[in-house]
Image (cartoon, rainbow, N blue to C red):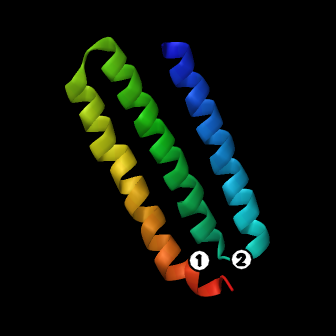
């Protein structure tokens, strides 16, 4: 089961890299927006990996903490960046 989990995270990481690369072709953003976008993607992956490993080990509170502290703010920052900076530039 854990091998499937880590394979899934690898696929998710690859999709995030491809998405950011595609976005870099379509829009022109400031350097700090790119740093925030990449950092948020990594925070989401880190939170999901921590939560997945914690749930497999049977420590659900640690997994919930990872989702709240890392994955949640990552999703919120990406949503904010999309609405404020990326969506207005897309045609």
Instruction: Tell how many labels.
Output: 2
Q: Residue furthest left?
A: 61
Disc 2 element: loop
Q: Please tell me how crowded label 1 is: few (under 14), some (14-19), or many (20+) other residues with Cα within 10 Å.
A: some
Left or right: residue 89 versus residue 2 is: right
Residue 38's place in the image compared with 8, above or below, is below
The spot of residue 9 in percent (x, y) is 56, 32
Residue at image coords 36%, 30%: 51
Residue at image coords 75%, 74%: 26
Q: Specify the quadrant of the image occupied by residue 69.
A: top left
Q: Are marks 1 and 2 in contact (CB under 8 Å)?
A: yes
Q: Specify the quadrant of the image occupied by residue 85.
A: bottom right
Q: Residue furthest right?
A: 25
Residue 27's place in the image compared with 8, above or below, is below
Label 1 or label 2, whichever comes before in sequence order? 2
Nearest the camera: 28 or 26? 26
* Residue at numbered disc 1: 86
Residue at image coords 59%, 40%: 12
Q: Specify the quadrant of the image occupied by residue 4.
A: top right
Q: Please tell me how crowded label 2 is: few (under 14), some (14-19), or many (20+) other residues with Cα within 10 Å.
A: some
Disc 1 element: helix
What number is the disc on residue 27?
A: 2
The spot of residue 43 in percent (x, y) is 47, 46
Nearest the camera: 32 or 81? 81
Nearest the camera: 32 or 65? 65
Residue at image coords 53%, 62%: 36
Left or right: residue 1 versus residue 71 is: right
What number is the disc on residue 17?
A: none
Disc 1 from disc 2: Cα separation: 7 Å
The spot of residue 58 in percent (x, y) is 26, 14
The spot of residue 10 in percent (x, y) is 63, 31
Residue 13's place in the image compared with 49, above or below, is below
């Amino acid at each position: 089961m854990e091998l499937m989990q880590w394979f899934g995270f690898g696929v998710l990481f690859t999709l995030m890299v491809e998405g950011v690369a595609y976005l870099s072709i379509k829009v022109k953003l400031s350097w700090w927006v790119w740093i925030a976008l990449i950092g948020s993607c990594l925070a989401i992956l880190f939170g999901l990996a921590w939560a997945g490993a914690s749930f497999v080990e049977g420590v659900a509170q640690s997994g919930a903490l990872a989702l709240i502290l890392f994955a949640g703010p990552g999703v919120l920052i990406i949503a904010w960046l999309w609405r404020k900076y990326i969506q207005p530039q897309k045609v």
